[in-house]
Amino acid sequence: MPFLEMRDVHKRFGGVVALDGASLSAEPGELHALLGANGSGKSTLNKTLTGVVAADRAEVLLDGQPVTLRGPREAQARGISAVYQELSLVPDLSVEDNVALGVEPARFGFVDRREQRRTVRGVVERFGSAFEGRLPLDTPVAGLPPGEQQIVEICKAVARDPRILVLDEATASLHEAQVRALFEALRDLKDRGVLVIFTSHRLEEVFELCDRATVLRSGATVGTVELAAADQAEVVRMMLGRSIDRIERDRTEAPEARRVVLEVRGLITDRLRDVSFTVETGEVLGVAGLQGQGQDELLEALFGAARISSGEVRLDGKPIHPRSPRQAVRERIALIPGERAREGLFSRRPILENLTLASVGRRALPGGLLRGARERRAAGDAVRRLQIKLGRLLDPVLTLSGGNQQKVVVGRWLLTEPRVILMDDPTKGIDVGAKEELYSSMRRLADEGVAIVFHSSENLELVRLCGRVLVLFEGRVVQVLEGDQVTEDRLLEASVGVDQVPG
Amino acid sequence: MTDEAAAPSAPSSPVRTAGRWLADHPAAVAGIIAVAMFAAGELLRPGFAGYGQILNVLRVAAFLGIVAAGQTLVILSGGEGVDLSVGKVATLSAIIAARTIDGGNDLMLPGLALALGACALIGLINGLGIAFLRIPPLVMTLGMIAVVQGVILIYTGGQPAGRAAPLMTDLVSGRTVFRIPGILWIWAVVAVGMVVLLRRTAFGWRVHALGTNRLASGLSGINVRRNVVAVYTLSSVLAGLGGFLLLGYTKTVFLNLADGYMLPSVAAVVIGGTTLAGGVGGYPGTVVGAIVLTVLESLLRTMQLDEAARQIVNGIVLILLLSAYGRQARLRQ
């Protein structure tokens, strides 16, 4: 009899079926991956287990006993802890207080600080190498870099001594060393008999860490595989229900009629040091580098969202001075921001408005009057071009899966008919299938003559899509790779400063 | 969960479907509450829900509804938006109008223009302070109450003078077809204008966007500050219009004529289903909200409670109503 068994889980949100008979079965002391394309129901299944989402119908058995999970507290009481990409930390409290929050050791109703420190230190020490310098037990969480905050969130879950630990895209903001530390700690938990349910869009991580994987597609379970005996292509095929070629290069070939659209010379901002480059029509220019080397600031500066201290930006040969996003929009520059929920989505508004907002002014009659049919047609156009899967245009955008939400953000900009699109890691947190669709949209846009500046934290994407890649290191362009030079190896070398020959 | 013998797809009994629909349409819930209160009043005292009485309730609700129109915009636009100065601004509007017009029909339009101009200026200052100096709306508009009060005292010397033009009184209180007082037609025009503004203009869509996510609004090329300034300016102008019309009803002014609309205007918006966090809601809800508040007041009078008891019951009912609206339809996380 399996330790955890979920059977026949059904859930729908409005018109969208999220889970349609999904199942999962796992043992204690197992590292179990949950895999699936965008909108396949991974998150919903996770949240059903952690009590955050109430299934329409489900059978959940723990140790063979049927259980009903009516909320996160009830799930926690049964030993189920969860970590999501979104953090639940109190920014002003110290790391120690955050980890202990809700499970403070108490004596006569007072928090026993010494005991608390001892237990929290025990947990955080397991992740010691994930922190720079000493353990930051007394540092307010707000003062830590995002990756370390994520580790603190994981510590918080581990401090609850769970029997089941659910990690849903918990590695998205971690750098390499932190992922190592996390994996070590997870293997340790496994040895203590904890069941870890692990979701990540980075397939390599899953193969490296996990024992078995349950694959979901369209809300139903396709199968469970022993990862040691499977290869990545096979698992991807299960997720997609079709095969994809491993690395096909989607770069657009240089047509003769190319001309320079965007020209940047000597750009200096708080974090950029003398950055110069050009982008041509129909080009996808890559921006690479380790996390936080100024990539996002480069895009924001071009979009008027970060202050430029000096330097020149020319659009079609004409100097521009991007001082606000509004000006950038008027110059037909678009930015797909890196943090979708915080910077891109109007979560409670309908899909329709999310799609049309940036371009609504140009379709309006004098006085700002809108014509409903025209707005719907514009939105429908974007939905078709990006193959957005939705129930109705008037549903809140939050009812969509992550990948489709991202497509809505892209669609908003398509409707402004941009000359330059700046993309800040647009595939972060979305999975293979949605990524593929986004890539082909990018290629099509480039073919239509749009210039794209594409920052990605996944080098493989840059290899696939870009004929030319700028590599940033501490705010400088340390190398420009072109054509056949653009390989994962070369990108990595350049990112860490190996082979520093100026491009 | 055990093996339920539920239907294969989503279970949807008519009752649950209706429940879900109501959760998504709080204005409809408010409407049902209003009708229920009319019915309760009719049982307590026959005639409460008579035609004349309903017209009377609507007429009283109209002034609140017009003052709360601007409040709807402000709350929708988010950023902890609230305009506590609407009551005082409405009072100022009435005072300026009364003194300028002083019973002369030909001075009605200049009086209206002067009053609304003064209100627009106050709203503009509110908006500039909130958008550019980043003063929290609660603080800015609360402070503005004191400023406007001072302006009123200087302007009137403590003794408000003048009166409404007869034409104003005709427009507001004059009976038209089916004995409908003019103010209801004016309210209808305001309501249609508000709905068009919010649903059918680029400005309206931007206000909703601002209320949901200011950062994303800015990054989508929306001029956040200009729109926030416009929202607060409009709020004051609509409050001023409410004060002007109220003058047509009362014919003379007092120093605190419309001050009492401050909190009911917020309550009407929230009862109408506009979320205090911003981004979701609309004016039809506020119309119903204003009616609910007015019927409630009238119902409590009918029950012949004394003033103190009436206030307590009024407060409790408000808390119950407002807290019921804190519950949002659940969405995918």
Image (tube, coloured by chain):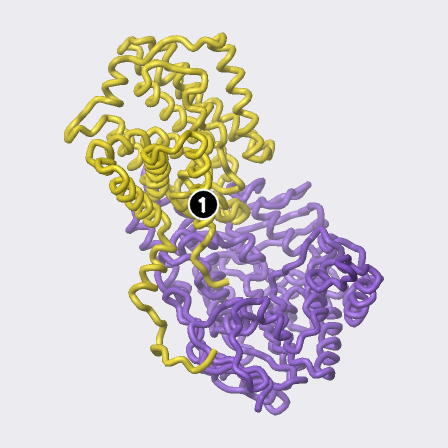
Chain colours: A purple, B yellow
**Residue linked to disc 1:** B322
Q: Quadrant of residue B91?
A: top left
- Amino acid type, residue under disc 1 in the picture: Leu
Residue B219: % across, % down? 53, 47
Residue drawn at (70%, 50%) of the image: A272
Residue A190: % across, % down? 70, 82
- Residue A449 visible in this rendered orientation of the protein: no
Residue A455: % across, % down? 60, 60
Residue B226: % across, % down? 49, 34
Q: Quadrant of residue A490?
A: bottom right
Give me the chain letter of mark 1. B
**Most extreme residue toward the left, as rendered?**
B177
Residues packed near mark 1 inside 10 Å, few (<14), some (14 to 19) or many (20 plus): some
Check the image and report above or below for A68 versus B34.
below
In terms of depth relative to the viewer, which is nearer, A155 or A108?
A: A108
The local secondary structure at tag 1 comes to: helix
